[in-house]
Image: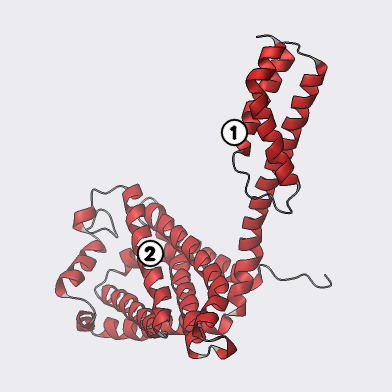
Amino acid sequence: MKQLQFERHHREDWEALEKRLDALDRRVADDEVGDLPELYRRTARHLALAKDRHYSPALVARLHRLVLRGHQHLYRTRRRWGGRVLQFFLVELPRTVRAERRLFALGAFLLFFPGLVMGLASYADGRLIYTLAGSEQVRQMESMYDPANDKVGRGAERQAASDFQMFGVYVSNNAGIGFRTFAGGLLFGVGTVGTLVFNGLFLGGVAGHLTGLGYAGTFWPFVAGHGAFELTAIVLSGTAGLQLARALYAPGRYGRLGALRAVAPASATIMAGAAVLFLLAAFVEAFWSSSTLVPDEVKYAVAGALWALVAAYFLLAGRARRGS
């Protein structure tokens, strides 16, 4: 193809790219790149062809400028996107949680205190678990952590399920718990408080019941690994739900709807952190907790390290340096 034909054939792409770049240059933010990636790729191919066919230096220079400008915009957009993600997880999320430390502490109390009480009571009296779960559900839980079970943590109906399938099951279950805990805040906090207390009672009751049966050697190594992520995520969901309840109870000069709008960014930030922790919990539960190749001592050591990591993250991440 001769240069003149080449220019006529691809001129529309080059003009479209130049128009897009000019529009991006005039804007403060360049988040909406639109069709820039595809136009950039096509023009980069055209530049390679122009060089290979020894077209005029003027054409090569024009295409080179367009490709260079396109690369700069794409690189800057990607860098900003990555920077925003790092900023969110390293600064915004832990700072937002610390700003709501009282609600976080309340959510933790509503989950862990009933769980501790019910756990001790169920350990002393195995019949108490039936006040929270039916006989069939209790039987299934007992079979899941029976030392004779080939795949600890899985009921008979899921013995053939792969780790990837169980990962999907755990993600679904965790998402349901998080959403109910958070959305319950719209019921003036009654739903959030009730969900936290019930989950605490249920988890504590199961732990006490199974420990009393002599299944501690299978139950505790299984739940230890993902507990740091899952329990913290439940408390975070409760924190976000309690934020909604507080806005409804004490809207101030905004009115209830305005107060909900005002608290929405912080609640969304906390729920995003909870979602990530729920995802991590599902991954650990599916691929680590269920493994029979890892000694129990290693699982306990990893569990301790994960709890320390989670605590250090929310206590220390995003703090300003002294003198800065």
- Relative image position of residue 30 (x, y in whole percent): 68, 49
49 over 320 or under it: above or below? above
Q: How does the figure colour the protein chain or chains?
A: secondary structure
Label 1–label 2 contact, CB within 8 A: no
Q: Residue at the spot x=57%, y=85% of the render?
A: 254
Residue 88 to residue 99: above or below:
above
The quadrant in which the C terminus is found is bottom right
Residue 282 position in % (x across, y down): 40, 58
The percent coordinates of residue 160 (x first, y second) are 23, 48
Instruction: Read off the residue under disc 2.
Output: 174
Residue 295 in view (yes/no): no
Find disc 1 in the rendering and name its residue: 38
- Residue at 54% over, 82% down: 259
Foreground pick, 44 / 21 = 21
Quadrant assignment for the N terminus: top right
**Foreground pick, 97 / 46:** 46
Residue drawn at x 24%, y 62% is: 144
Say what amino acid the circle numbered 2 marks: Asn
Residue at the far right: name it.
323
Q: Position of residue 320 (x, y in %)?
A: 75, 70
Residue 123 visible in the shown view: yes
Question: Which amino acid type is shown beneath numbered disc 1?
Answer: Glu
> Secondary structure under badge 2?
helix
Nearer-the-camera pick, 137 or 22: 22
Question: Residue at point 42% right, 86% down?
Answer: 188
Q: Going by the picture, which residue comes out furthest to the left? A: 135
Question: Dot 1 surroundings within 10 Å: few (below 14), some, or many (20 or more)?
Answer: few
Residue 97, picture quadrant: bottom right
